[in-house]
Amino acid sequence: MHPQLETIFDEAENRYLKPEELSLLGEYVDSLPERLEAYRNLRDRELKIMQSVADQLQLELPQQKVEMLERSIKNALLLLRYCAMGMLLNDETFVKERLLGWLSQTIQVYDTRSIDAVLYRLLNQRLKQALNPRHLTLLSPMLLLAQNTLQQPANTPTPNR
């Protein structure tokens, strides 16, 4: 759950919620049906989206070993799932804590940044085609956070970790 909402619920144990806290909670609750719809849409189309990205990735990077391409595709699939959950929860911390630490280490160990750069471009293009603009707007902050963090050079510290 969004860290601000968690804080609101923790503080509300001893008092009623303040108007600004109720407003924040209301905004989240109001956005939840759209977030659920976006999550379901992405879940239901994941295979088709990722297959299209994988096919195009092989065409654009024929010189790369299949094992390296497969590793990057699997990582991108996990990235997409974690970002979808982060979008549903409206919680960037979820993505940072659950995904970025171990995935950035994996990318560094296997040195897949060049493959991932192409893969992220293809994934973003395919998501623009597969999702409606409202859903893409909800998902994009999580994707950008993850992709930008993972594309940083190895010696650059990642934010908020």
Image (tube, rainbow, N blue to C red):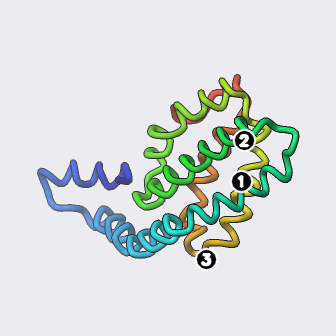
Q: Residue 32, relative to residue 69: is it above or below?
A: below
Question: Disc 2 vs disc 3: Cβ atoms closer than 8 Å?
Answer: no
Compare residues 17 and 68 and report the one nearer the observer: 68
Q: Position of residue 22 (x, y in %)?
A: 28, 67
Question: Disc 1 vs disc 3: Cβ atoms closer than 8 Å?
Answer: no
Distance CA(mark 1)–CA(mark 2): 8 Å
How many numbered marks does the figure carry? 3
The residue that mark 1 highlights is 54
| Left or right of residue 54: residue 27 | left
Provide the secondary structure element on which disc 2 rests.
Answer: helix
Q: Label 2 sits on what residue type?
A: Leu
Closer to the N terminus: mark 2 or mark 3? 2
Closer to the N terminus: mark 1 or mark 3? 1
Q: Position of residue 57 (x, y in %)?
A: 78, 51
Q: Residue 118, relative to residue 35: is it above or below?
A: above
| Left or right of residue 2: residue 127 | right
The residue that mark 3 highlights is 132
Closer to viewer: mark 2 or mark 3: 2
Question: Disc 1 vs disc 2: Cβ atoms closer than 8 Å?
Answer: yes
Closer to the N terminus: mark 1 or mark 2? 1
Kindly identify which numbered label has been placed on residue 69.
2
Q: Label 1 sits on what residue type?
A: Ala
Q: Residue 101, relative to residue 33: is it above or below?
A: above
